[in-house]
Image (cartoon, helix red, strand yellow):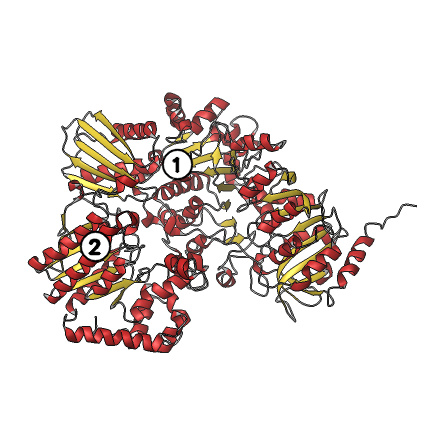
Amino acid sequence: MAAPMAAGTDPRALSWYEATARQRVAALADPGTFHEFLPPTERRMSPHLPLFDLPRAFDDGIVVGRARLDGKPVLVAAQEGRFMGGAFGEVHGAKLIGLLRAARDLRPAAVLILFDTGGVRLQEANAGETAIAEAMRAIAELRAAGVPVIGLIGGRAGAYGGGGLIAGACSRLAVSEGGRISVSGPEVIETNQGAEEFDSRDRALVWRTMGGKHRRLIGGADAFAADTVAAFRAAALDLIGRAPAFDLATLEAEQARLEARIARFGDCRDATEIWARMGVNDPDAVPAMTTASFDETVARVAEAHHDAR
Amino acid sequence: MTDWRSEARLPDERIAAGRAYADGKVVPATRAVALLEAVLRPGDRVCLEGDNQKQADCLARALAACDPGKVHDLHMVQSGIVLPEHLDVFETGIARRLDYSYSGPQGGRIARMLYGGQIALGAVHTYLELFARYFMDLTPNVALIAGVSADREGNLYTGPNTEDTPTVVEATAFKNGVVIAQVNEIVERVPRVDIPGDRIDFVVAADKPFYVEPLFTRDPAAMTETQVLMAMMAIKGIYAEYGIRRLNHGIGFGTAAIELLLPTYGERLGLKGRIATHWALNPHPTLIPAIEAGWVQQVHCFGSEVGMDRYIRERPDVFFTGRDGSLRSNRAFCQTAGLYACDLFIGSTLQIDLAGHSSTVTRDRVAGFGGAPNMGSDPHGRRHPSDTWMKAGHEAQGVGDPMLMRGRKLVVQLVETFGDKLVPTFVERLDALELARKTGLELAPVMIYGDDVTHIVTEEGIANLLLCRDADEREQAIRGVAGYTEIGRGRDRAKVEELRARGIVRRPEDLGIEPLDADRALLAAKSIKDLVHWSGGLYEPPAKFRNW
Amino acid sequence: MESLTFRHTTEKPLGGTAPSAITGVVASGNLEILLERVLPPDACEVAIETPIAGYGPVWEAVVADFVARAQPGGLRISINDGGARPDTVSLRLLQGARLMEA
């Protein structure tokens, strides 16, 4: 299906943050190789939203299909963060789970999940929650079968709620500066704990705590990408090549990594304290760093590199 | 015998009363209420400094905390009604009469209080008009102002946000008034003297730095394709056509999009150096790419903008800065520059009627004017020609002796046909008329009168009102760019096509612009972060605009 | 939700061979437009689902102008609206037609 591209611009130079899910998928894959499952013409829309007098989307906010990446066969799912915050509804979730289950039979070189979600869609919460759990199980089975699942996170909705949980189940994650990974969102934390604990309007604080640079430095994400489709493509190819085995040793290493993290940084009040303790020379300078100088900083930090997850 | 000094003795009495709470001129914030109660007299005219940017907020809180038994019936003469305290004083009776200029965030509450009769309103002014009255019939008895720092003698550093301060102090200090300044810190030596100490009677060491609203920051991430299209039309159909070099921009997203299109689309049209070289403008972050790309020769500012101080310091060839390196802004002078020295004003509005009158007043909000009616008016006192001014004058008149012809300032309204929540911008009748009727105002609060407007730009096209020869042509030209609003759908299609043939209404295709090419990719910066990169890391945006 | 359907006869079919295309996203102030080449070459149908009721005459005018300008014969056009302004609707319709002509 034809999808729009900015006139006269190189699709791979597209800003990941700005692009739609369809633009991301089309530009990420080898040109012309993306084949969509359940395309918009099938009109698999939410059966629930009309009850709430809310508009539906022809693809229920997620694009799924197969493509080639540098010649290798992959399956791809891309969430549209601008439609209801990329939230998981019944159809949306079923499309992702169906793709993950298809991967068990098709054995692609990898499954790519382009996260852009605030979590579960409130209007379809039960179905959404179930989908999160089923997606995590499906990912575990896929990884056990030797198919790497790579998460790419750089959209405006981030990877929150159940999306953050599914991201945690992936083999490897790539994130950009604008990308955010967490379970509870900033507003949720503020509502429950008060603005003194976490001021959700302090966007610098939000990104320092949940944003791509922080997640990369502490090893929560395994690659840092500039905000272009080309950079995410390069990161995805690299991560497919070094996905960890899904065995007891990996899981024990992951447990040890997380225990060490809480022991070492549990008393820190701000991400900059964590970065200082890691040995980052000028923690306050991290948010403003260019991709190149941030990569150099990451290279010097031990936490960013591990064989866990 | 006439006593020629009865008024002149007053400041001495007030100052003597205030000294009880001061160490020399310096007063701690904790004694600010007592100071004000000692200095102020019932019925005083008081200027509490504050506009659309900086606020003397510590003094505003102190005034609101005064005992209404001691301080009452004040006549507030001030630029902005912005803080809650600015209106609290009318609820408690501390103040009764009001003459002002701008009320952004308090627009809803001020409307309710006007309806309720709690405020005796003199008039809503433009900034320059209110400043002018400070020297005529609205001279303050007491001015409560804000500065960055002061020494113990009262020498004041007002810094990048100097804004209204010199004007307010001039009117008060030299006409028997008392000036009280709040400052962020008392220092041994100020970086530069913006106001000499002998004009400052008391210095209050504020409990926290004065508040400044980042009103002029527009996040490029929020700009739409429609705004890009309108910016393309404005650049090609107006800036290039009239060769506009000296100009002022309003604060909307549309004008910010123009700023971001100069180094891309403007460059492609070969306009660099030919347009947009001299500005009366606050330091808009979205102007950074044009400055860095060498488009801008100089910028004089009304005030500053949060996060721009370091950038301005490093670009003294462009901005007006003191020997200390920091920006010197001045609202009165910049408004004057906008009035007499700019060839174009372009800004947005909420409502336009069939005669071209526009207003930002809606049924339940009185936003005030700020500087727009001054910028957006054709000054009849102008005498120096420029190609732009003369071309516009020719279009407006057409006949008569060219040597006796007035030029015209271009006053452009850049509006989308529908606003938020699908509210139409084009209306039969301005809400301002209804407001005036309900509150008993003699004049409806019109922002820019129709006879000052020269062009209206919408996503549908450009209407050149200079070329219209009668009221009917004018109405159809306005309908002809009013899109799918009721006004737009009510157009006489044949008449609009005739106007189009005469170049009075121009569509994007008439300008050689393909609407489908209006892409965000044309923006020189697509995010606040891009602006930081353009500035070489010198621009430091406030936290609420960051996503890193 | 309000459903609107407009049917037009065109003078000619839309050029190009793309069987379908989609543009836009259902978000606040935006909309998605699905175009399918499934109708007779001189017919065009535009079906709209919108959460904002009462704008039928505006939609009618926008669609009529689009049909006159683009001559989208053969297309069934389906719109999920998120409360887009008419100019955004026009723009998306033209973007969609351009994709189908590719």
Secondary element at tag 2 = helix
Q: Chain of mark 2?
A: A
The residue lying toward the viewer, choosing from B263 and C75, is: C75
Callout 1: chain: B
Q: Position of residue A89 (x, y in %)?
A: 24, 49
Quadrant of res A303: bottom left
Question: In what quadrant of the picture does the N terminus of chain A appear?
Answer: top left
* B16 and B159: which is toward the camera: B16
Outermost residue on the front side: it is A126
As shown in the figure, which amino acid type bears the numbered disc 1?
Answer: Leu
Q: Residues within 10 Å of mark 1 (few under 14, many from 20)?
A: some
Image side of residue B286 versus residue A253, left or right:
right
Mark 1 in CB contact with mark 2 (< 8 angstroms):
no
Q: Which image quarter is the C terminus of chain A in?
A: bottom left
Residue C96: in sight, yes or no? yes
Is B44 positioned to the left or the right of A55 in the image?
A: right
Residue positioned 80% across, 57% down in the render: B12
Secondary element at tag 1: helix
Query: Residue B422, which numbered label?
Result: 1
**Residue B385 in sight here:** no
Q: Position of residue B308 (x, y in %)?
A: 49, 59
Q: Amino acid at mark 2?
A: Thr
Q: How far apart are the two marked residues, 1 and 2, measured between alpha carbons?
A: 38 Å
Q: Which residue is mark 2?
A: A130
- Number of the front mark, 1 or 2: 2
Q: Quadrant of residue B121?
A: top right
Residue A216 against residue C42 in the figure, above or below: below
**Residue B322, image x and y in percent?**
59, 62
Residue C40: image location, x then y, percent: 13, 28
